[in-house]
Amino acid sequence: MRFQSVFFCGTLIFLAPTAQAQAPVPVKHVFDAVSIRPHDPKLPPGPIGPGPDGYRAIDEPLAAIILDAYFPRVSQARWPLKNLPAWGLSEHYDIVAKVSPADFAAWKEQTDNWNPATPNWILMEMLQSMLADRCKLVVHSVPWQADGYALVVGKHRPKLRPAAPDEKIPATAIRIPEDGRMVPFRDRNNPVLTFYQTSMASLAAELMTMSPMPVIDRTGLHGKFDFILPKRDVGGGPVVWDFESLGLQLEPIKIPTEDIVIDHIERPSAN
């Protein structure tokens, strides 16, 4: 089944899936070894997500793992899991899963470029298989209309400079979704984001890491650009980015998405 998600740093944020999940997809990747145990209070909570050679989730409910398996990102504003038993949230587990040597190269390629807005299909396939095997999880999808934003061209001509293929990108730039580059702001008194080699799809995907709602690109602009996104002055309030200075704007829209309905789930079988 191909949904999209991530339970990122303990926060649920929503992203629309891109494919229906009416019939099972043959599993291409499975974990080589999996340990699932009731949470040991002696273990400190840790980050949930992929690592260099596997997946780790300490002191997490199964709900978080299901979200990781079926959505690249999930919304705090609503709950996309239906028919989840109460223990799916109240009971916490420690999960450590290892990748097989045969899958290591593909795993490394995905996780080295991992971003909360970028689906990690290998991880999702492995988690879905793990949940089906150890928890007998069976789900189906139902359609939903989610609140989101469309990145569009504004009233004025876009102010974006085409990126030169051989331009020098600062060492402080980080990789963002869709292979763009961004230099984060360092001074909260003058927050400015500087983008290099960034497409509009890349910008929209990066905005999803800053927003509790999905953002999609509807600018119709192709290619990669260099540009600076400044803060709009809102009188000392939270950071609001000045898209109008780029000739862009965000429009509220409804985005077709899916929820998943849990048809069957059991507590994890013993190791």
Image (spheres, rainbow, N blue to C red):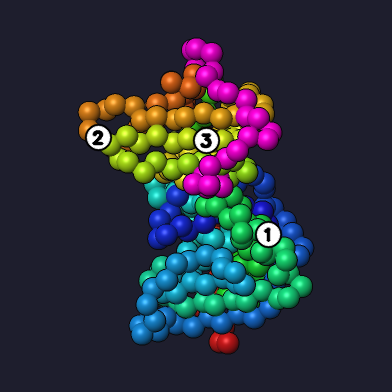
Q: Residue at x 72, y 63 (%)?
A: 106
Residue that protrudes farthest toward the left in the picture: 235
Residue picked out by circle 3:
195
Q: Where residue 158 sits in the image (x, y, percent)?
A: 54, 18
Point out the tag, 3 or 1, that comes first from the N-terminus.
1
Q: Which residues are magenta?
A: 154-176
How far is disc 3 from disc 1 in space, using C-alphas?
Answer: 23 Å
Residue that protrudes farthest toward the top in the picture: 156
Image quadrant occupied by the N terminus: bottom right
Q: Nearer the viewer, mark 3 or mark 1?
A: 3
Q: Nearer the viewer, mark 2 or mark 3?
A: 3
Amino acid type, label 2: Gly
Q: Where residue 222 sits in the image (x, y, percent)?
A: 66, 26
Q: Residue at x 46, y 57 (%)?
A: 8
Residue 109: image tag: 1
- Quarter holding residue 236: top left
In the image: residue 186, left or right of residue 99:
left
